[in-house]
Image (spheres, rainbow, N blue to C red):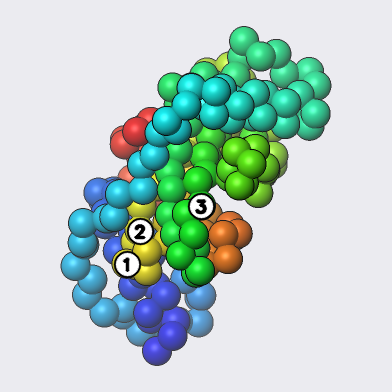
Amino acid sequence: MKGHANHARWVALWALLGVAGCSASRPASDTTPPPRVEAATPAAFDWRPPLQRDSDAFAERYVQTIASALPTVRRAELPNPLSEARLFVFETGDGSPRRCGALGGPILFLACMDAESTWSVVSQHAELAPRWTRDHADGYRVTAVLDANADGLPEVVVREGEREPPREVVVEARGDGSFHRTSEHRCKTGPLTHGWL
């Protein structure tokens, strides 16, 4: 039954995003139809730093991370961190707030703020970087931050380039404040439409 519960969880996530004709990946050996899942209203995790310097520091950390990993990418070619980043806050297992930001582009960038208001990189993926172009078509796009399974922890939904078929993946927060890539979703009916949020 565990496989069915996990599959139902991701079906609910894609239902929340309103994407028709698509399904979450599941083991090929699991042939039993999953239970019916009703979409629920996702929890909100939006957060905007009260101080402009915190937003600026996130943007600078993003640019520094890319400059270190991809020195040939010019700053003018990158997404605008101040307008395109998804900043969110959630409570960890001990009840303390975890303030984080996610942004795409040539890499998938996830950073969280520590007690000294310093942004630390907690997760990054750069598999698409060699194909990066200025129009974002071959990079990462953060399309949503929501709670698909009502556990109080956010899932970051990311579009991975203009693949055929298009693909979205989920990077899930854990109670200890860490993040793990947990699921992927393929769409057979064409590109997704929800875009930047």
Amino acid at dot 3: Arg
Pick the quarter of the image with the N terminus. bottom left
Which residue is label 1 attached to? 150
In-front residue for pair 146/23: 146
Q: Are marks 1 and 3 in contact (CB under 8 Å)?
A: no
Q: CA distance from mark 1 to mark 2?
A: 6 Å
Mark 2 element type: loop
Mark 1, other Cα within 10 Å: few <14 / some 14–19 / many ≥20:
few
Residue depicted at x 30% and y 49%: 44
Residue depicted at x 43% and y 44%: 88
Mark 1 or mark 3, which has the lower sequence index? 3
Mark 2 or mark 3, which has the lower sequence index? 3
Pick the quarter of the image with the C terminus. top left
| Disc assigned to residue 147 | 2
Q: Are marks 1 and 2 in contact (CB under 8 Å)?
A: yes
Name the side, left or right, on which 124 lies relative to 13: right
